[in-house]
Image: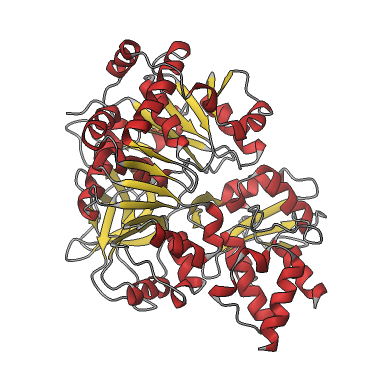
Amino acid sequence: MMDELMEILEELRPDVDFANETKLITDGILDSFDIVALVGELNDAFDIEIKPNNLVPDNFNSAKAMLALIEELQDE
Amino acid sequence: METSVLCRLNSAVEKYGDKIAYKDPENSLTFRQFNELTRSIGTYLARLVPAGAPVVVMSGRHIFTPACFLGAVRAGCFYAPMDGDMPVTRLNQILGVIKADFMLVDKAHLEIAQGLEFRGTIIVMEDIIDYPANDELLEQREKTLICTSPLYVIFTSGSTGVPKGVITSHQSLMTYIDSVSKVLDINDTDVLGNQSPLDYIAAIRDIYFPISRGASTFVIPKNEFAVPTALFETLNREKITALCWSVAGVELPAKLGAFDVLKPEYLKKLCFSGSVMPCKYLKIWQENLPDVLYVNQYGPTEATASCTYYVVKEKVDDDTVLPIGTPYDNYKVTLLTEDNKPVANGETGEICVSGPILALGYYGNAGYTEKAFIQNPLNSNYRELIYRTGDLGSFDENGILHFHGRMDRQIKHLGHRIELGEIEEAARKIDGVVDCCSLYNKPKEHLYLFYTGDATSKDIVLSFRKNMPAFMVPRKLVNLDKLPTLPNGKIDMQTLKTYFK
């Protein structure tokens, strides 16, 4: 699943080092428009529904955090 | 009649002295404190910079930035704001057009400024905010300003690959601010929530409503727009009553479901502009906040970012298309056919605008200026300049204007105006790109680049990220062996559009 996530992230922003960045939101590396695009793609790709309450920096600051969020939402 | 925006600032200080004028998460400035800052900055600049000269301002998203703008004005100058987050190539292009000798920066942007192709003097705002103001000098400089003096130069996308600097006068700005204040009933009880970057045209209301109407403005941190619940919490904490946002900004919280969690409790007025509002998102706002005044504004930067407005009284549906309405006070709209004749009743024509809100033209570019700002072809008796917007519109039987798209390849994407030709110019400069065509998939808001050559999509995106503003980076890249062509050899854009995913 991580590979699929990385592929989506890489296509969205090939200029960002998703393997190592841990402050994607806090440092403003991903902006609001990236998030809108990303939420749509993640919902479709992983058959989940990301809710506004999930949209906090902790859930999107790194690829690892995003993966954890996806797994959590898939379990629901 | 007021000679400059300084008249407004002077009377606002007398009337509202200790009221908050501008606030951000770290600081706040009363009208008096703000004014003192502009006087310090203004005195320092006036000792160095001749009256009437441009001052480039590169300062961050905080309340000292408007003080830099008005400080330059206090020195009898006009300001050219630049967003320091933009790539160096872009900043150098802007500097090449404005050719200023002085740049005012905040400390955070000093290093970037020093790395630019700029041979003039760089002044750090933090070093001069306590500089002793000189009444006599400031008064002299204020007297040099007349209402047609330039106030600012704001840059927008140009189809040849070089950004165009639109020059706005004090008179144009004040005319617009007064007209839009009337429609939105902006007064000294209002608190604005600023969304637009401060260097961008859409921020002029957030900057000038305080000094014109006694309102306050809160500068919302950029990353809160990625966290919609935090955004609404801020609107409530700061008791924000009025928002003048881009359509893209208004869509965000609706798209991300923020209303499911909380609502902006104090909001009374929402003015949106910049592109066509998809009503499925406006509907969400209306359902949650039925008593808010919703205003759809239309207009180009060249007419002080405005032209007409439409107060949305009806409940919209997903597929409602909002009209762009009627001209603001002191705006005149004329529709012209392709051969410069008046359109027949109800017919579609190019929207042309005239009045004291017209820009003074494009900075240092008489050629472009003469092409876009022309004598009204329907008037052979006296001088009346009109600006040809390149937008198509028609008046209905009630005199309400409706928008019908562009005549050329200019698009609106994420709230910004983009010439697709500029994207192509930038792509052609990349090694491994032979030919290309940029198109916009409007329903999905995807900016496409179709190209031939052996560059990878990663090469292209990296080059764009390095050289162009983020909103101009193509989201979808399609490598083709050959671009489809029409019998006349031109690129077949209709066929390319069928490749949209």
Can you name the residue that lies furthest to the bottom here? A76
Residue B336, x across and y down, in percent: 29, 50
Front residue (pair B286, B355): B286
User: What's the coloring here?
Assistant: secondary structure
Left or right, B406 with respect to A5, comes to: left
Left or right, B409 with respect to B11, comes to: right
Residue B320, x across and y down, in percent: 34, 74
Going 41% across and 55% down the picture, which residue do you hit?
A: B274
Question: Is residue B5 visible from the viewing direction of this image?
Answer: yes
| Above or below, B16 relative to B501 | above
Front residue (pair B229, B366): B229
| Above or below, B99 relative to B351 | above
Going 61% across and 74% down the picture, which residue do you hit?
A: A40
Going 80% across and 78% down the picture, which residue do you hit?
A: A1
Residue B452, x across and y down, in percent: 76, 56
Position of the N terminus of chain B by quadrant? top left
Can you name the residue that lies furthest to the front here? B18
Q: Count numbered badges in the picture.
A: 0
Position of the C terminus of chain B by quadrant? bottom right
Going 24% across and 28% down the picture, which residue do you hit?
A: B7
Question: Is residue B362 visible from the viewing direction of this image?
Answer: no
Front residue (pair B254, B38): B38
Residue A58, x across and y down, in percent: 66, 66
Front residue (pair B166, A13): A13
Q: Quadrant of residue B325?
A: bottom left
